[in-house]
Image (cartoon, grey):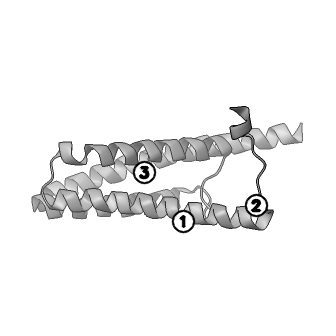
Amino acid sequence: MKLCLRQKTVLDEREMQEMYRIEHRGLWAMYTLLCAAVVVQLFFGAGFAQIAGEVCVISLVSVAMIVAYARRGIWDTRARPSTKGNAAYSALCALGVSVVVLGIRGDVAAAVVTGICTFVLCFSLLCALMAYMQRRQKHEADELDD
């Protein structure tokens, strides 16, 4: 069994980087399409039993990726953790949820309330994650100094 798990790679560094880029794009395409499939199913009136599998996969992948990034001190490739960025991401998320709720229910008040609740929840979670990341990065920097 060890023989199967520890095989020498036949790819050089450039090919490995290219393979990682392909896998990265494939993961995000799959993730985006899975989220879009859930939204489309909701617009067509699917019940929770019909979308439960997709929602579970999205949730598990999201939590696993957040935990993995946080453990390694990685925030984003193009941004540093900031309150302004957290507010922008939360606003985009709240807008998306509001549009979906408005499309499904047709009730503006429910869409606004859901959007506000989504913004508060996302902003709170992102700020808590930002504080954890900054504490973790400071701890790692202190370990390097010692």
Q: Amino acid at mark 2?
A: Leu
User: From the viewer's perspective, is 97 left or right of 16?
Assistant: left
The answer for how far apart the CA atoms under marks 3 and 1 are is 27 Å
Q: Amino acid at mark 3?
A: Phe
For image coordinates 65% across by 45% down, the residue present is: 134
Q: Which residue is mark 1?
A: 25
Nearer to me, 80 or 51: 51
Earlier in the chain: of badge 1 and badge 2, it is: 2
User: From the viewer's perspective, is 72 left or right of 126?
Assistant: right
For image coordinates 38% across by 64% down, the residue present is: 92
Which is more foreground, mark 3 or mark 2? 2
For image coordinates 19% across by 56% down, the residue present is: 42
The answer for how far apart the CA atoms under marks 3 and 2 are is 42 Å
Relative to 24, residue 73 above or below? above
Q: Amino acid at mark 1?
A: Arg
Which is more foreground, mark 3 or mark 1? 1
Mark linked to residue 48: none
Residue 136 visible to the viewer: yes
- State the image coordinates of residue 7 (x, y, percent, origin top left): 75, 45
Could you tell me which quadrant the N terminus lies in?
Answer: top right
Q: Secondary structure at mark 3?
A: helix
| Residue ranking furthest to the right | 146
Earlier in the chain: of badge 3 and badge 2, it is: 2
Mark linked to residue 11: 2
Which is more foreground, mark 1 or mark 2? 2
Q: Which residue is mark 3?
A: 123
